[in-house]
Amino acid sequence: MKRYRITAVWLIAFMLIISGFAYAQGAQQQTRQQSMEMVNVNIATQEELQRVPGMDQSLAQSIIQHRQTNGPFQSVDDLAQVQGMDEQKLKGMKGHLTAEKININTVKAEDLQKVPGMDQALAQSVIQYRDSNGPFQSVDDLTKVQGISDQKLESIQAYLTVEKINVNTATAEELQIVPGMDQSLVQSIIQYRETNGPFGSVDELTQVQGMDEQKIQSMQDFLTAEKIDLNTASAEELQVVPGIDQSLAWNIVEYRQANGPFGSVDELTQVSGITEENLSTIREHLDVKESGGLLNR
């Protein structure tokens, strides 16, 4: 009996060690993922700005004060105008920052309410209108939302933009915004791209189970099938590309954070784990745009 008790104690201890190790690994993975998230200098709180390596409290406050006085930054390079920012600091932070306008067709309420002049109630009204009526055709359509007058729109529109929903990077939640898109069809689209890689065009959606030409025609005004932008894509979005697994996606994002935006797709050969050979298989799905693109997430 005593031997069984000792064995049970060791077994419990072993299980606790394994559980603790798994928990530590999970926490480390979560921290790594959080450190990869781009910080939008136009809506970030002081706390969010201070998470950026090299950003202290004083500089974060200066950034917020500058945008309150002068309006949103047009690009990350505009941070050079902020008191306390120098060329060396900016170079070290560039890979962590974006000055993207907010896409009102995909933004979540918690990010939308960070826009100056937009509170929680108004942000919820925008999301509810979008869920009921489908994607916005223009920023001016916001005047159809209860609580947004012409005057209110004028004060917030510099922070906002309208973009079609990219079937190559959209989440299930974002795809369901599109009129005529039900849960079953959304899952089929995501499953298809996970198996076959990014769509080359919106017309390729005809290959998806449950989709026909008539449905595509009705949705075409709301959708796009753009290549994945190396300078704005999250690690999760990069994994849509065949040949890019989680580890490689993380390496790409971490390289971008350390070295700033990619100048070309060919620069991927500088990333650990990417050779000329596997670059040739993934490059057709990738693109490099200016770092001041659009916020889709």
Image: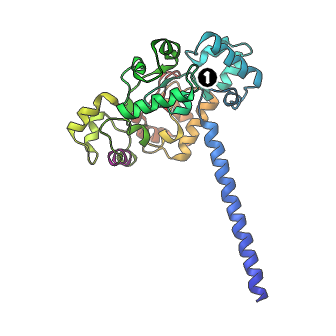
- Residue at the (72%, 64%) spot, across then down: 17
Q: Secondary structure at mark 1?
A: loop
20 left or right of 292? right
Res. 179 image quadrant? top left
Residue 241, can we see it? no
Using the image, determine if residue 161 lies above or below residue 133: above
Label 1 belongs to which residue? 41
Report the residue that reaches farthest toward the left. 214
Q: Residues within 10 Å of mark 1 (few under 14, many from 20)?
A: many
Q: Position of residue 243 (x, y in %)?
A: 45, 45
- Residue at the (42%, 44%) spot, across then down: 242
Residue 99, can we see it? yes
Using the image, determine if residue 278 lies above or below residue 111: below
* Region of the chain picked out in magenta, as a range: 184-191
Using the image, determine if residue 214 lies above or below residue 162: below
Q: Nearer the viewer, residue 185 or 129?
A: 129
Q: Position of residue 106 (x, y in %)?
A: 45, 32
On-image quarter of the N terminus: bottom right
Q: Position of residue 191 (x, y in %)?
A: 37, 49
Colour style of the rendered protein structure: rainbow
Q: Position of residue 159 (x, y in %)?
A: 52, 19
- Residue at the (67%, 56%) spot, across then down: 23
83 left or right of 173? right
- Residue at the (57%, 19%) spot, across then down: 117
Q: Nearer the viewer, residue 229 or 138?
A: 138
Amino acid under disc 1: Val
Q: Nearer the viewer, residue 75 or 264?
A: 75
Report the residue that reaches farthest toward the bottom. 1
